[in-house]
């Protein structure tokens, strides 16, 4: 289903999607006082939304997302449950421009990236992402696949988060800059790219 185009949608002057529209996008349950901005985009949705939920402008929601009650997703956030499930517990908050991924290319791998190439050329890391009750994620932070943020944990701005964050923890970015930890096989990667282009050309010439 296309973004912002649920099958049952009709003309509306409200800045928020109706419950009926959210069901049409794919949410199986929607609570009360749910305000999802019409300026957000929703793709391939599954999951649920609790009550008293706010999703601000220009957010992107994809895949299976389970949103609890009293959850706020601030503007420009990206939440992807395409390769797993994202669970946002009651009273959890995503500040502006937070990105949550249940799937990520392995940046160490001698492989291609991008969803536009054949699966055999990719190496994808997958895992559910869980934010427990009252977890807070700061602006511009990135949550990687397989992350569990404990109850009432607080992640500061500009953090890269992976693994288990203890309940009640306060975590901040170290701002250590770039560290080089090895090299990728350039020839192998570019050879794979050339192979994909050849397949494209062969398909186009048929």
Image (cartoon, rainbow, N blue to C red):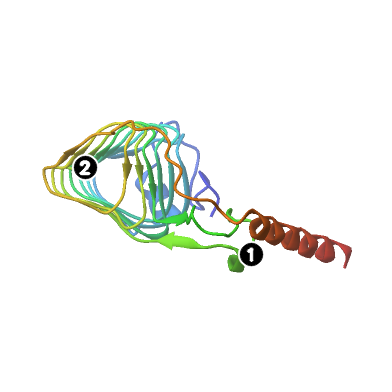
| CA–CA distance in space, label 2 to label 1 | 36 Å
Query: In the depicted view, which residue is nearer to us: 124 or 61?
Result: 124
Horizontal and vertical percent position of residue 160: 34, 42
Is 181 displayed left or right of 165 in the figure? right
Q: Quadrant of residue 205?
A: bottom right
Q: Residue furthest left?
A: 168
Is 67 displayed left or right of 75 in the figure? left
- Residue at (50%, 38%) from the top-left corner? 11
2 vs 1, front mark: 1
Query: In the depicted view, which residue is nearer to us: 82 or 175?
Result: 175
Nearest to N terminus: mark 2 or mark 1: 2
Horizontal and vertical percent position of residue 116: 63, 56
Q: Are marks 2 and 1 in contact (CB under 8 Å)?
A: no
Horizontal and vertical percent position of residue 148: 24, 54
Query: In the depicted view, which residue is nearer to us: 111 or 43?
Result: 111
Is 34 displayed left or right of 152 in the figure? right
Q: Does 178 sit above or below residue 106? A: above
Question: Which mark identifies residue 206?
Answer: none
Question: Which mark identifies residue 92?
Answer: 2
Is 152 displayed left or right of 200 in the figure? left
Q: Does 106 sit above or below residue 155? A: below
Q: Residues within 10 Å of mark 1 (few under 14, many from 20)?
A: few
- Residue at (38%, 31%) from the top-left corner? 75
Q: Residues within 10 Å of mark 2 (few under 14, many from 20)?
A: many
Question: Which mark identifies residue 118?
Answer: 1
Q: In which quadrant of the rendered image does the C terminus lie? A: bottom right
């Amino acid at each position: 289903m296309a973004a912002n185009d649920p099958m049952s949608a009709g003309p509306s002057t409200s800045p928020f999607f109706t419950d009926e529209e959210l069901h049409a996008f794919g949410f199986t349950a929607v609570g009360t006082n749910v305000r999802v901005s019409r300026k957000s985009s929703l793709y391939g949705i599954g999951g649920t939304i609790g009550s008293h939920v706010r999703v601000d402008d220009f957010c992107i929601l994809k895949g299976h997302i389970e949103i609890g009650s009293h959850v706020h997703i601030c503007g420009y956030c990206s939440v992807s449950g395409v390769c797993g499930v994202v669970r946002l517990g009651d009273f959890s908050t995503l500040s502006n421009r937070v990105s949550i991924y249940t799937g990520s290319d392995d940046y160490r791998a001698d492989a291609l990236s991008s969803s536009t190439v054949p699966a055999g050329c990719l190496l994808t890391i997958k895992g559910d992402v869980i934010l427990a009750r009252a977890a807070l994620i700061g602006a511009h932070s990135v949550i990687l696949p397989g992350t569990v943020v404990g109850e009432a944990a607080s992640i500061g701005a500009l953090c890269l988060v992976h693994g288990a964050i203890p309940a009640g923890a306060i975590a901040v970015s170290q701002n250590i800059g770039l560290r080089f930890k090895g090299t990728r096989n350039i020839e192998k990667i570019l050879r794979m790219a050339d192979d994909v282009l050849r397949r494209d050309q062969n398909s186009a010439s048929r």
